[in-house]
């Protein structure tokens, strides 16, 4: 709405009244739906001289407000315009990057605690841009999600994962991340099926990782696809468990094959007793549901010992296995000579990282 008033306080007051009036709980088919709204505010003449410009800037402010948790009113500022332009530029480059084959996968090992053996790998997307250098997925995945490019990316990842499984028969399992948009697509299951058939890959070696946020997006469609994926024999893991709003209800909605406890819990062990207690409770929950629990983000020996003592079934983390460029896989397999267990990987990684660390410490000494 446009109000002829350029006073920031009264604009804020009006926005608060709109929020108060429209935020409500609705009952629908025995379910309670909590509606929340976000109001973007742009002031005349500070944020625009025309109706069109004001609306466009209020729109930008609204989207910025939506991207933040618990922000129902957001006032435009000039930095937002730049932020949106930067993201548009990144999206354009990303579109080209997919065509120019600048994407690749890094593989991070996952281990069984009982045997210490390699359980599989998680495929993590990497983008090396000749212009920007290496761009973190935390930066470009959200851009891709905003403009739908993520669907093409997820499809690319599934295809590439199946090719890797064909190329390296010794890879026990490869887990791929699937986004909220892709998991709701009607042709996702057919795409997965054809990638597997084309590469002659057994479904048992493929895993789909899905976060709670991806499910909330459109629960019914997502569940429909997940059931079909599971019926093919592919396992489904719940990713980032514990950081969402309704992780528990998600567990009752679908029979997940694995729970991945978000790394933030194990990383707080030692400083935060509550995080440790939640970690143990999740492992207990997994054992009650007969669903194996994987601890993500293990970075130290103390964290490893904690996870072992808590009784979780699988482990993943920088401590024994950083994500490895796909191109290094054959050398890693050759150098490990079939010793695919946690100790051998850790030794191999420590040796691999040693020269860089030694160089860093020499540089530190020189600077001191
Ligand atoms: P995620 O699925 O939770 O992946 C795990 C992230 O934690 C990875 O970051 C990984 O490098 C990092 N990590 C692993 N071990 C440790 C550790 O011990 N300590 C710490 N601090 N971090 C650790 P990365 O590769 O930057 O990926 C970030 C996120 O981007 C992923 O989080 C996932 O949500 C998304 N992502 C990555 N690849 C894909 C993809 O192919 N498709 C989709 N849709 N999303 C992807
Ligand atoms: Ca993941
Ligand atoms: Ca995760």
Image: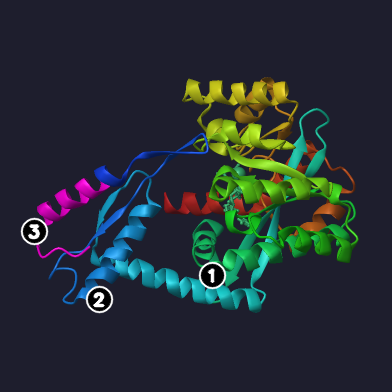
* Image quadrant in which you'd find residue 152: bottom right
324 vs 195, left or right, is left
Give how far apart the Cα atoms at labels 2 and 1 are: 37 Å
Report if residue 108 is visible in the image.
no
Tell which of 174 and 106 is nearer to you: 174
Number of residue marks: 3
Mark 2 / mark 1, whichever is N-terminal: 2
Going from N to C along the chain, the mark reached first, 1 or 3, is 3
Q: Residue under label 2, please give it.
A: 52
Between the C-alphas of marks 3 and 2, the distance is 19 Å
Residue in the image at 64% along x and 51% along y: 221
- The residue identified by callout 3 is 7
Dominant secondary structure of the magenta stretch? helix
Q: Residue furthest front?
A: 29
| Residue 272 to residue 217: above or below | above
- Does the numbered disc 1 mark a residue whose Cβ is under 8 Å from ligand 1? no
Q: Nearer the viewer, mark 2 or mark 1?
A: 2
Magenta stretch holds residue 9: yes
* Image position, residue 58 (x, y; %): 26, 64
Distance from label 1 to label 3 (Cα)? 45 Å
Residue bounds of the magenta highlight: 1-19
Name the residue carrying label 1. 133
Does the residue tagged 2 have its C-beta within 8 Å of any atom of ligand 1?
no
Please check the rendered image and state whether residue 248 is part of the magenta-colored stretch, yes or no.
no
- The kind of secondary structure element at disc 2 is helix
Is there any visible trace of residue 319 in the rendered image? Answer: yes
First of labels 3, 2 by sequence position: 3
């Amino acid at each position: 709405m446009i109000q002829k008033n350029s006073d920031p306080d009264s604009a804020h007051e009006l926005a608060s009244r709109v929020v108060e009036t429209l935020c409500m709980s609705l009952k629908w088919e025995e379910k309670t739906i909590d509606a929340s709204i976000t109001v973007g505010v742009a002031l005349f003449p500070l944020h625009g001289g025309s109706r069109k410009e004001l609306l466009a800037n209020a729109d930008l402010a609204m989207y910025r407000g939506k991207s933040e948790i618990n922000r129902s009113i957001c006032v435009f500022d000039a930095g937002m315009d730049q932020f949106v332009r930067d993201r548009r530029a990144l999206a354009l480059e990303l579109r080209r990057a997919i065509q120019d084959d600048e994407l690749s996968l890094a593989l991070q090992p996952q281990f069984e605690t009982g045997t210490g053996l390699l359980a599989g790998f998680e495929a993590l997307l990497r983008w090396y841009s000749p212009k920007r250098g290496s761009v973190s997925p935390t930066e470009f995945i959200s851009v891709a999600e905003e403009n739908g490019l993520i669907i093409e990316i997820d499809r690319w990842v599934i295809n590439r994962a199946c090719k890797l499984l064909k190329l390296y028969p010794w890879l026990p399992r490869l887990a791929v991340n699937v986004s909220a948009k892709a998991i709701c697509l009607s042709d996702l299951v057919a795409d997965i099926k054809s990638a597997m058939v084309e590469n002659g890959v057994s479904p048992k070696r493929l895993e789909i990782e899905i976060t709670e946020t991806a499910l909330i997006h459109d629960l019914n469609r997502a569940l429909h696809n997940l059931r079909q994926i599971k019926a093919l024999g592919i396992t489904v893991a719940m990713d980032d468990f514990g950081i969402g709003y309704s992780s528990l209800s998600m567990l009752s909605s679908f029979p997940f094959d694995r729970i991945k406890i978000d790394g933030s819990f194990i990383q707080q062990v030692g400083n935060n007793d509550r995080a440790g207690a939640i970690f143990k409770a999740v492992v207990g929950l997994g054992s009650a549901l007969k669903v194996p629990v994987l601890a993500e983000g293990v970075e130290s020996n103390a964290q490893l010992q904690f996870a072992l003592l808590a009784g979780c079934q699988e482990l993943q983390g920088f401590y024994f296995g950083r994500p490895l460029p796909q191109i290094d896989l054959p050398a890693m397999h050759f150098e490990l000579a079939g010793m695919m267990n946690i100790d051998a990987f850790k030794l191999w990684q420590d040796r691999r990282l040693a020269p860089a660390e030694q160089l860093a410490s020499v540089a530190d000494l020189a600077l001191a």
